[in-house]
């Protein structure tokens, strides 16, 4: 038996627009897709290494949260920093 999809607000809006026939095919789809894929690769490319000192307690907490998410703790740290510098994660001040 298929489970119903759980869609977030943005996904529901896209589905409603599709069902109302409000979406149009993109011209030059393959070229646009190639450009977007290249931009994503360039944006997400990890080409710098850093060393950082953390308290044992903070590192253990990060490792536990990463384990709960099923991702490496370095990936969690990198993702969190990326969200912060792109404005998707706000300072706690």
Image: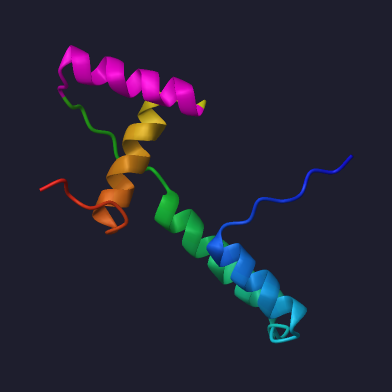
Q: Position of residue 4 (x, y in %)?
A: 76, 49
Read off the magenta span.
Answer: 53-69
From this view, report whether residue 25 is shown above or below residue 91: below
From this view, report whether residue 74 is shown above or below residue 13: above
Which residue is depicted at the point 25% across and 19% down?
A: 59
Quadrant of the frame with the N terminus: top right
From this view, report whether residue 25 is shown above or below residue 67: below
Q: How many marks?
A: 0
Quick one: which residue is furthest to the right in this view? 1
Frontmost residue, 39 versus 19: 19
Q: Position of residue 30 (x, y in %)?
A: 70, 73
Q: Position of residue 17 (x, y in %)?
A: 67, 79
Which residue is depicted at the point 37% across and 42% down?
A: 79
Dominant secondary structure of the residues highlighted in magenta in the image: helix
Can residue 71 be seen by looking at this rendering?
A: no
In the rendered image, which quarter is residue 2 located in?
top right
Q: Is residue 65 magenta?
A: yes
Using residue 11 as the reference point, say whether residue 22 is left or right of it. Answer: right
Using residue 79 as the reference point, say whether residue 2 is left or right of it. Answer: right
Which residue is depicted at the point 25% across and 53% down?
A: 85
Can residue 75 be seen by looking at this rendering?
A: yes
Which residue is depicted at the point 29% across and 19% down?
A: 61
């Amino acid at each position: 038996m298929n489970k119903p999809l759980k869609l977030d607000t943005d996904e529901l809006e896209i589905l409603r627009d599709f069902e109302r026939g409000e979406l149009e095919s993109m011209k030059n789809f393959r070229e646009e897709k190639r450009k977007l894929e290249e931009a994503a690769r360039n944006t997400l490319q990890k080409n710098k290494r850093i060393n950082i000192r953390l308290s044992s307690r903070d590192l253990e907490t990060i490792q536990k949260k990463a384990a709960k998410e099923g991702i490496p703790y370095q990936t969690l740290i990198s993702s969190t920093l990326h969200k912060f510098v792109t404005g998707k994660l706000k300072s706690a001040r």
